[in-house]
Amino acid sequence: MANEGWIKLYRKVQNSFVWSDANLYKLWTLCLMKASHAGNRMIFNGQEITVHSGEFVTGRNALTIEMNRGAKPAQLVHSDFVWRSLKKLENAEMLHIKSNNRYSVISVVHWDEYQQSAQPADNQPTSNRQPTDTINNAENANNAQEGTTTTDRQKVFNFFEQGGFGQLGGFQIQNIDEEIKDFTTAGSPEPEHMVVLGLQEALNNNVRKWSYARAVMHSWQDNKVLSAKDVEAYKASHRPQDGAFSQPQGDESDDLPF
């Protein structure tokens, strides 16, 4: 991690569940400091990995070493605590984690809206610095209301916002595109519609969280459920107790982007 530059830390963190746990707060700020501002190529365990803005590469043990650097013996944390805490931040939709057996790529949610513009010479309000994709999405949404044909991808964006999953930003657009790509790679004939169905399934269970909808979609992908017809057959063949998804753990009031 480069020990230069700076990050934004919003006062609303005092109202978040991370504020009441010193080690959790330390881990959260460490993630903010490790995240790449503009994307980069990083070396981890001898492997070169490309990361985008708001992302960094690490491993459970490597992150634990950083957490414990300079700490007194009584303040040392175990790697299991670090991993459980990362998952807690992910369930609260503050982080997104993609792991394999060699490393994890951790992404800070809403990085573009809250950190990307963190430049000393830039004093413009955050609302004037939205990513180009976000501005284009708003324009496309207006066009849709006026009767202009929208793309299947845009329909996913519209459903996300209209369903109450939150404000659509650059990082969330990337998350949605990744799920569309995953369904496409798996052979789905209607990848965008499958993402909409995943969001709809979350609404059906009264859970307006992207992490919940993503868990539904990943289960479908694992079980080769790749079309609307497959979804109906899959749901019909599973009893509610077998097919239901549990709501991600975390305080609903703490779903705060920083």
Image (cartoon, grey):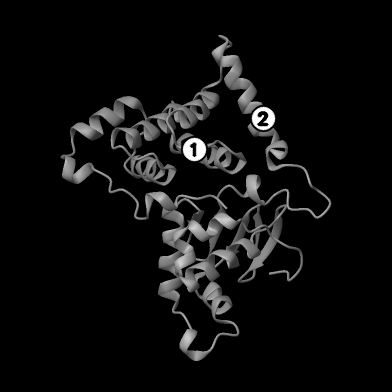
Dot 2: element? helix
Relative to 25, 253 lies left or right: left
Q: Which residue is painted at 43% across and 26% down in the image? A: 193
Q: Marks 2 and 1, Cα distance to the nearest angstrom?
A: 16 Å
Mark 2 vs mark 1: which is more N-terminal? 2
Residue 33 percent coordinates (x, y): 65, 64
| Count of residue discs | 2
Asked if 152 appears above or below 167 in the picture, the reply is: above
Q: Nearer the viewer, residue 69 or 98?
A: 69
Q: Pointer 2 and pointer 1: residues touching (CB < 8 Å)?
A: no
- Mark 1 residue type: Gly
Image disc number at residue 144: none
Q: Position of 225 compared to 75: left or right?
A: left
Mark 1 surroundings within 10 Å by alpha-carbon count, few (fewer than 14), some (14 through 19), many (20 or more):
few
The quadrant of the rendering that contains the N terminus is bottom right
Secondary element at tag 1:
loop
Measured from the top left, where is residue 229 in percent x and y?
30, 25
Q: Residue at x 28, y 45 (%)?
A: 245
Q: Find disc 2 in the rendering and name its residue.
A: 135
Measuring 54% from the left and 81% from the top, which residue is drawn there?
Answer: 68
Q: Where is residue 100 in the image (x, y as percent from the top left)?
A: 48, 60
Q: In the rendered image of this protein, does residue 222 appear above or below residue 158?
A: below
Quadrant of res 26:
bottom right
Q: Residue furthest top?
A: 147
Q: Mark 1 points at which residue?
A: 166
**Picture quarter containing residue 17?**
bottom left
- Nearest the viewer among 47 and 77 is 77
> How many residues crowd mark 2 within 10 Å: few (<14), some (14–19), many (20+)?
some
**Res 6 → quadrant:** bottom right
Q: Which of 232 and 109 is in front in this view?
A: 109
Say which amino acid is labelled 2: Ile
Q: What's the residue at 38%, 49% (across, down)?
A: 252
